Amino acid sequence: MGNNSMKAEGQSILAIDIGSSSVKAACIGTDGSIVVSCKVALPSIVNGDRVEIGAQPLWKAFVDSVGLLRQNGHDLSGCIGMGITTQMAGLVLLDREGQPLRDFILGVDQRGADYVLELSLRLQGTDIYAKTGCPLSGIYPSTKLLCLQAEEPHILTKAHYIGGIKEYLLWRLTGNWMTDPASASTTQLYDQQQQAWWPDMLSAVGLVLEQLPQVCDPVRSAGALLQEAMHELGLSAVIPIVVGTGDGPAANLSSGSVTGQQLCISLGTTAVTRFWAKGTESYTGEDHYFRQHFGWDMYLQGIRLEGAGQRISELLPIHSLPDSKTGDPTQPSDHALQLQEVLDSILFTLYALMEPLVAQGRFEEIRPIGGGVLSATWMQDIADLFQLPVLLTAGGDSTLGAAMIVIKHIKAEVDWKDISDRLVRVVHRIEPCSQASEAIHRRYESHNQMMKGGRRDPFRP
């Protein structure tokens, strides 16, 4: 599991997060400070609800991100470990030699939507959600595989390795085919109750166990860095690599949400809430909540609002998020009103789905992460609606979570709370305002009445 003591101050961790549109890389100190960071765009190919990227452009962006850290003057040979997180629910098919058979399907791709019913029919009488923690949705590799069976059967017959983006990167770096429980959880092929691949689901989608990666705890070593990978990355020394996790759990870690009393809200490409739970019990009784097995007896539960970030982005070029200093704030434009309506719809939907747990007093605080935290108005609205303090933290993305996993690898006996206290820095605390809470709850009730009146909420699962 690595060394038994933390190395000297001043050393750093190489942390890389691969999203749907960019690769973020950073060297993060053992105190959580960002020594140097960069971002490289990913040339994704978007065709309607289908989103792909070529293997070589992905690998090049990964290599370029590491190169940019060196160009910015950081000596990577002093890094004590490398951690990787990626967007979850992607699909990668490799042949027997480990070569890509087609472009990679990203997690945001929803080509499987037309095959959700087919999947449920193939497993008729089985509670797919109870087993996998995945609601019936077109984003998961299970339904994407059914789509490929219908459209590209010749490709599937050649597939020797089937996994996701992080699994491919670990393969290129170490030659080992492995994954973590959270990434496995977002395939809909993993039985969270048994903490193993689910034979019935594999049979339903036409896979065999040998095609899938070995499932390992996220803090486990992924193996030694291959010489070819060292050369391409421009590294002069071997950097230990851990298995890592998906961007969702990493976002929780990055925000300092490491206990069941903290609610993490990610406001990026999608709007997502996540909280820690023990075991596979559903805390809501509603199957649109997802559940992910992080490792050990740690599980994440939450909800996901697809398309939230995209809808905001469509309006941002016209009008920035609330807090903009441009224009006359007393005369909001039609576009500004449209943006506020979208922000309210996202917030009110998140609250409606989380309200049963909020009413139980489950949470003590909220820790948001993602681009949405740049809006102080939106953050205050969250505090006022949930009537909980909102804590904003430094870091801002999943790279810090990747670094925390490396530290857990190095010092296994230290718990996640201690690691969070060491690395995560709270920069601002927003308290709920009682008068404003009354006002936003009136807006919330008005929104609910409109939904009952037949108006469709675009973000409601």
Image (cartoon, helix red, strand yellow):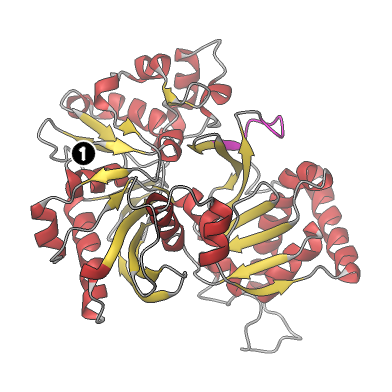
Amino acid type of the residue that numbered disc 1 sits on in the rendered structure: Asn
Q: Residue at x 49, y 14 (%)?
A: 121
- Asked if one can make out residue 330 in the rendered structure from this viewpoint, the answer is yes
Mark 1 element type: loop
Residue 264 place in picture, x, y as percent: 62, 55
Is 337 drawn above or below residue 250 in the view shown? below
Residue 217 picture quarter: top left
Q: Magenta stretch containing residue 302, yes or no?
A: no
Q: Magenta stretch containing residue 285, yes or no?
A: yes
State the predominant SS element of the stretch in magenta: loop
Residue 78 place in picture, x, y as percent: 25, 69
* Furthest-top residue in this view: 125
Image label count: 1
Residue 453 picture quarter: top right
Q: Residue at x 41, y 57 (%)?
A: 407
The residues colored magenta run 282-291
Residue 229 place in picture, x, y as percent: 13, 55
Q: Classify 10 Å Cα crowding around label 1: few (below 14), some (14-19), many (20 and above).
A: some
Which part of the image, by quadrant, shows the C terminus? top right
Residue 152 picture quarter: top left
Q: Which residue is mark 1?
A: 176
